């Protein structure tokens, strides 16, 4: 028999209270800025890789104004090897906007958060919910997978959030914003630790006795995206070129750029992409640097 909304909420929040990992951005005294930084860093990046970078970032830039006072290149350099370095530029641009438009304080309103540079629907909803206790639907891949399996019998979510998923999640949220946020983070944790995309731990899941997907025999329906190849890709080439600049004390010569990747055509494509994305600046005398 399927769980009713109240039973599902209780099962997830009780499990979360007993099982949740200690993560610094979940601390009661974590600032809205700390929550925003964590949400941007956690996009497509596992917690184990984010933790050290997050700690260093907040130690250096504990408030938006601290980051806004620095050059965008400093943010790119500090981003290190987290991947998808445009996120560093987005965080810097968001910090500048927070200082200029919100007196240095992260806004609590979803629409104002959504208007910040580089902040999409998910991140705006997550910060409004987790930093300010606002009632918003927070749908990441983990939440979508848990709800899809438990309530609809779908093994894996599609590439994009559907109206049906959003409506289902909204119907589950309690009216109280703090309780709604707790349910959302509990669903995230359940997806990360138990209802995993591969090798789910159904025996230890608080929803296992009523999970539609498990009761149907865990069919392999839905969409399963193949693991992304990395070696030899443009993304790896971009990372190699950016590492040369990030690890240098100043601008570098074209010769050093050329030495970082052997394929000349792919190297030029990667370099052009980095320049177009604002991650690299071409300078005088054929040199290149991080954005000033």
Image: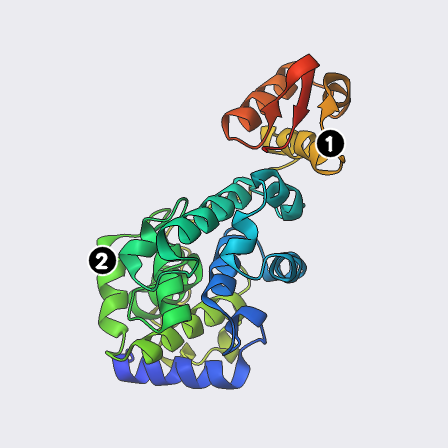
The reply, left or right, for residue 120 in relation to residue 258 is left
Q: Quadrant of the N terminus?
A: bottom left
Q: Is residue 285 above or below residue 8?
A: above
Q: Which of the 4 quarters of the picture holds residue 14?
A: bottom left
Q: Which of the 4 quarters of the picture holds residue 263?
A: top right
Q: Quadrant of the C terminus?
A: top right
Name the residue tied to disc 2. 164
Residue 252 appears at what percent x and percent y? Answer: 74, 25
Name the residue tied to disc 1. 250
* Total count of labels: 2
* Lower position in the chain sequence, tag 1 or tag 2: 2
Cα distance in 3D space between marks 1 and 2: 51 Å
Count residues near mark 1 (Cα–Cα under 10 Å), then give few for <14, some for 14-19, many for 20+: few
Q: Is residue 290 above or below residue 283?
A: below
Residue 208 appears at what percent x and percent y? Answer: 42, 78
Residue 196 appears in view: no
Relative to the observer, which residue lies in front, 88 or 93?
93
Cβ–Cβ under 8 Å for marks 1 and 2: no
């Amino acid at each position: 028999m399927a769980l009713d909304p109240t039973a599902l909420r209780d099962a997830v929040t009780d499990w979360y209270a007993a099982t949740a990992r200690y993560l610094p951005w979940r601390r009661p005294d974590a600032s809205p800025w700390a929550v925003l930084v964590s949400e941007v860093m956690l996009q497509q990046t596992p917690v184990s890789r984010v933790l050290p970078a997050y700690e260093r970032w907040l130690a250096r830039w504990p408030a938006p104004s601290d980051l806004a006072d620095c050059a965008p290149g400093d943010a790119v350099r500090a981003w290190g090897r987290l991947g998808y370095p445009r996120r560093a530029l987005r965080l810097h641009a968001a910090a500048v906007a927070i200082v200029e438009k919100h007196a240095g304080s992260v806004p609590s309103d979803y629409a104002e958060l959504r208007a910040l540079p580089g902040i999409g629907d998910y991140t705006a909803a997550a910060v409004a919910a987790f930093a300010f206790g606002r009632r918003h639907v927070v749908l990441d891949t983990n939440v979508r997978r848990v709800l899809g399996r438990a309530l609809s019998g779908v093994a894996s979510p599609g590439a994009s959030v559907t109206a049906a998923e959003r409506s289902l999640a909204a119907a589950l949220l309690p009216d109280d914003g703090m309780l709604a946020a707790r349910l959302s983070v509990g669903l995230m944790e359940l997806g990360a630790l138990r209802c995993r995309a591969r090798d789910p731990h159904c025996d230890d899941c608080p929803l296992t006795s009523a999970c539609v997907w498990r009761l149907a025999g865990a069919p392999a329906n839905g969409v399963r995206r193949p693991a992304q190849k990395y070696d030899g890709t443009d993304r790896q080439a971009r990372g190699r070129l950016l590492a040369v600049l990030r690890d240098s004390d100043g601008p570098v010569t074209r010769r050093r750029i050329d030495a970082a990747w052997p394929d000349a055509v792919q190297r030029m494509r990667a370099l052009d992409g980095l320049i177009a994305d604002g991650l690299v600046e071409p300078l005088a005398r054929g040199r290149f640097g991080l954005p000033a």
